[in-house]
Image: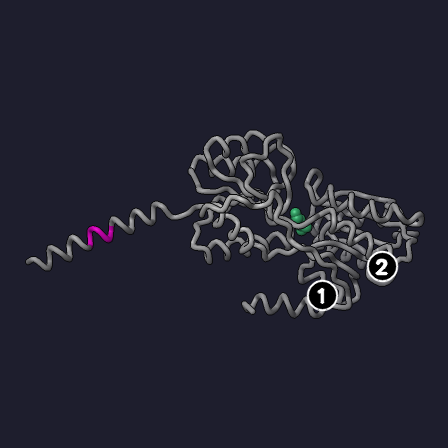
Amino acid sequence: MHSSKWVGAWATGAAMMFAASAASATTVGFAQTGHESDWRTAFSASMQAAAKEAGIEMKFSDADQKPENQVKAVHDFIAQKVDAIVIAPIVETGWDQVIKEAGEAKIPVFIVDRDVKVADRSPIVARVAADFHLEGKLAGAWLAQASKGNCNVVELQGTVGSSPAILRKKGFEEVISLFPGMKIVKSQSGDFTTTGGKEVMESFIKATDGLKGICAVWAHNDNMQLGAIQAMKEAGLKPGKDILMVSVDGVPDIFKAMVAGEANASVELRSGIGKEIFDVIKGYLGGKHDYPAWVVIASDLHTQADAQHMIDWWASQKKGG
Ligand code: AHR
């Protein structure tokens, strides 16, 4: 009798403790840009895996490259009283009001990848991101060397108003402006997608009578470059041989294109940074409040020389190596 009463009391106590700990579990809202590129999908997977590993519940919203969806997702996270909000912004502008509201609700905000331009950054704990300006400079420096400083370039820009499109262009232009024989002769946005890159390249091919006088294609991401490669091959051109191909991201398909001799160089934007991001969030929620405003992720340049190595590396990541 005694013992069954004790078991009952223990079970009730344990159930209450479980309910309390479930109710106090950490919840993070992640407002993701979309799924426009292979880089983006790999980044989302890394965030899901890191949240699971950290024992944090992550509410995931895919804005499908529409800024209004993304602002709404952040409003919803505030209403749900999440413990922290992570934003991977599509464009830099339009964030003042909702970030202010997160601050008023005392919900810390973490910016990842692209940046925001807001008058008051105080609700933002830190930004975890690569240096897009440096990526543009690395791409420009590679091309200056490969073309010996003489090159007419066509450029496939990323999403208009996004920080990688703005800063990669700026960094690239700063470097090529040091070479009187280098210039961008055509430039248009392909919105960071394979389809966008293909369509823009088709129009460039028409406008230049089959890329006459063009020495290189500079694309702000690999997916647009992969689209450009398709368009060029369909027009009977030889990307990677007659025309130099340089882009950013370092996704598996661009390394396969390099091994096939159809692409030449890509600046790697690391996608597996979920752990770094969740380490910062956990650290902050655990009381560490001295993070730098920008936690910088390194960028590396890869070429045909190490393309096979990068394919093997990606395969080992998939196997969990
Ligand atoms: O913001 C980073 C960029 O967004 C990546 O280079 C591109 O692939 C993605 O769409």
Q: Is 145 on the left-hand or right-hand side of 283?
A: right
Give me the residue at 74% from left, 58% from top: 266
Asked if residue 249 shows in the view, the reply is yes
Residue 62 position, x and y percent, is: 55, 45
Residue pointed to by mark 2: 237
Give me the residue at 64% from left, 53% from top: 297
Residue 17 position, x and y percent, is: 27, 50
Determine whether the beta carbon of the residue marked 1 sits less than 8 angstroms from the nearest atom of ligand 1: no
Q: What is the number of the mark on residue 256?
A: 1
Asked if residue 33 shows in the view, the reply is no
- The correct choice, above or below, for 307 with respect to 87 in the image is below
- Check disc 2 and report its element: helix, strand or loop: loop
Quarter of the picture containing the N terminus is bottom left
Callout 2 crowding tier (Cα within 10 Å): few <14, some 14–19, many ≥20: some
Q: Which residues are magenta?
A: 11-15
Depth order, front residue of 81/108 = 108
For marks 1 and 2, the one nearer the N-term is 2
Residue 3 position, x and y percent, is: 10, 59
